[in-house]
Structures are given as C-alpha cells and as structure tokens.
Image (cartoon, helix red, strand yellow):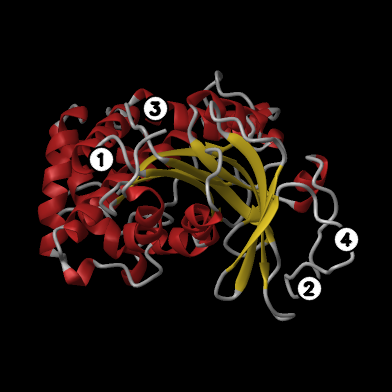
Amino acid sequence: MHDPAYERSLKVVYDRIAHNFSRAEPRKRAWNYLVDLPRAHTAGLRRGETVGHYSGEIRADGVQRLLTSARWDEFSVREELRAIAIQAGGRTGGTLFLTEIAFPKKGRNAVAVERQYSHDTQRVENCQIGLLLFYLTADRQAFLIDSELYLPPAWVSDPQRREQAQIPPEVVYRSKSAIAAEMIRRAWESSIRPVWVACNLVCTEKTILHRLLRRYGVQHLVAGSAGEMQAGGVGRAITDESGQPNGTTPMPPGHEMLQLRNTVLHRFSTRSSDPSRIEMSYLMLSGTSRNARARSYYTAYLRPHAGLAEVVPIVQLIEGAAAHCRAVKQKTGLGHYEVRSWRGWYRHVTLASAAQMALELARHDNSADLRPQYVDLRDVAYAAGGKGQAV
C-alpha cells in the first residue's frame, strides 16, 4: 500500500528530474521504482521482481534496463536534487555530514565487493562501501545530496573485474579522503555554505580532506583514532578507565574537559589562538564508567575560543551515524538492489536519494506518520549550527 503523503512530495521531486529521462518507458519505470522504494525493506522486495514494475508490461527485465542501459543521466539528476535541497533548506546555516555505509554482499562479482571494515557491524566482512553526503539544513531537514562508491585497490588493478563490472577506464584509485573532498567540493560549487562539516570515515590518510576544508575556512570535525592524536603530539591517553584525569600524567597545554551525561569530552589544543584563522584541536570522548563503550577520537578545526559546548552536537551527530544510516537504508530502499555494474550502483543510489528527498519533504509537511523512529540527527545539527552564520 502506497503512502499518499510520500507520493505527493515525490511528484514535486519527480517533476524536476523527469526531463532527464529521454523516453516515456524509462520515465514511467523511474516513477514506479521511486514509488516502491520506501516499502522495499518492509515488504522484502528485491531483485526487481516487484520494485518498479507496472501492470501490462511484457518483458521482465525492465528494472535492470532502467539501472543499466536506459538512456538517462544520473549525474544530471543529482545536480537537480542538490538544487531542490537548496531551494527547500537555503544555502547557509546548516551542516554537511559525510559518512560511509556498508552494503553486505555474497560472492565477489558485484562491483567493488571486497572484505572491508563495516561501520554497521564493526567488523570486516564481504561488502561494498559507499560514501554518503547529507545536507542538514538550518530548519532541521536532512537531504542526501551526493554519494560515491569506494573502489578498493584490488579492483583498480584487475582488468577482468573492471571489464565485468563495466568500470569506466578513467576511474582510478581514490582514497576515501579524496572522495570525500570531491563530494564536499561539489556541494560548495552548488553554493552551499555550511556552519559545520562533520565527517565519519575509516581512513588513515585524511590530509586531502583537511586541506580542502581549511581552505574553505569552515569549522569541521573528522572522526579519527588514538594513533592520530599521538602522531599530532598530544601523547598517550591521559585518562583512566573512568574517563577522568588520572592525576599522574601531566596535562598537556590547552587541555579542557566537559562533563556530559554519561561521557566526558576532552579537548587538546595544538596551536595558540589566532583571531584571524580557525585552529586545530584533538577531541576525545570517553565513558564515565568501566562498562562504558570505547573512546572516540576526533580531529577538529574550530574558531578561536570556541567553547566545548558548541562542539557537543557535532560529536553527537557523528556518534549517531551508524543508526542514522541504518534508518535511511530501511526507509528509502537504499540497500535493496541486485545490480553488479558500476553504473547500476550509481543509478540505484541516485533514485534512492530522490526517494529520500521526497520522504524528507513529506516529513517537513508535518506528516506525523513519516517522522523517523530513531535519534533525529537534524535536532543535534540544528542545535549546533541552525542559528549561526556560515564561516
């Protein structure tokens, strides 16, 4: 059973992107695909057996054609979706939130499938890794405006696998940091000017990403590790298992801490304040009991004299990334596809982004039944940047 509130919002989105489909058949197919995506998880729809089909069609491979060989430009559709997000939520005052998501797969024939670390399960498993960029607007809307597929090095150097997955010859290896920087650059070129940028990536090399964000002069937090803190000169961890200073290790210069409900947030400044530029800090979030979860580490570039309380909502945003991605997958059918090609993945995720945008527009119209039943990341983003101005 279809949701009328979703379909009303979907019509607004679809009318903006329909011109990118050159023929009537893919336009009709795309509409049916978008209508079905939000119920794909709860109804168990997979393999194109019912998603996107319409009554009276003769061939059974229509969905596969839509995602592989039909004539339409998925990247033009993405540009249109970014324009809709800007029109709905404005260009300034919000947060760009970039995270990665795992798509578990059996076998190794689907594009970019490799044994990789999954944020969802916190273990190494057979999966694809996608990078998602959300625009969290000042009025608490959350739009999925960009996505990229991470191609592991083993795939880049394997001509047979590249050919089977139809990976374009111009596609070369890019670290997650380089991919993230390119996605944020596209948002900037679309005139989005956030108060904050938050990134949650499993990546040892983040230089490219930090360099770009520093050039833009925007405050940002990037998830990191204890090793990165030590490499930055902060030294070994200075707290005991309770999360409190242990009293034996001297505090490094610029240390401050903030007691939260069940955690303690530490900040270690590595540069003296300079009113003309943002400054670098390391953050550590630790539990207040021996049964608390493991510590989290972040690299932060903040305005001089920014208080820790200003940073807390962005830390919470990153801490809730896994739950948010699981909810998005369930509500938009993001993980419900059986395509194996490079282009097929990008086309499915583009259509799932359109579905997510329609759901978000319907939610913003005060449709109570569409309000997510999980920790709402829009609220913490709003608390951090909703009333501020772009840096």
| Element under disc 3 | helix
Q: Earlier in the sequence, mark 4 or mark 2?
A: 2
The numbered mark, 2 or 1, whose residue comes first in the sequence reads 1
Q: Nearer the viewer, mark 2 or mark 3?
A: 2
Secondary element under disc 2, as helix, strand or loop, is loop
User: Can residue 85 be spotted in the picture?
Assistant: yes
Q: Closer to the camera: disc 3 or disc 1?
A: 3
How far apart, in angstroms, are the residues tagged by discs 2 and 3?
Answer: 41 Å
Circle 1 — which element? helix
Give the spatial CA distance, label 4 vs label 1. Answer: 49 Å
Q: Which residue corresponds to mark 1?
A: 85
Residue 293 image offset from top left, x and y in percent: 67, 72
Identify the residue at horizontal 13%, vertical 34% (top origin): 24
- The spot of residue 85 in percent (x, y) is 25, 40
Q: Position of residue 106 (x, y in %)?
A: 59, 57
Name the residue beneath numbered marker 4: 249
Residue 241: which numbered mark, if any?
Answer: 2
Numbered disc in front, either 3 or 4: 4
Q: Nearer the viewer, residue 379 or 201?
A: 379
Q: Residues within 10 Å of mark 3 (few under 14, many from 20)?
A: some
Q: Is residue 265 above or below residue 306?
A: below
At a point 48% along the width and 53% down the height, the residue shown is: 310
Nearer the viewer's eye, disc 4 or disc 2? 4
* Amino acid type shown at disc 3: Trp
Point 43% across, 34% down: residue: 343
User: Label 1 amino acid?
Assistant: Ala
The answer for how far apart the CA atoms under marks 4 and 2 are is: 14 Å
Sequence order check, earlier mark of 3 and 1:
1
Query: Nearer the observer, disc 4 or disc 1?
Result: 4
Q: Which mark is residue 188?
A: 3
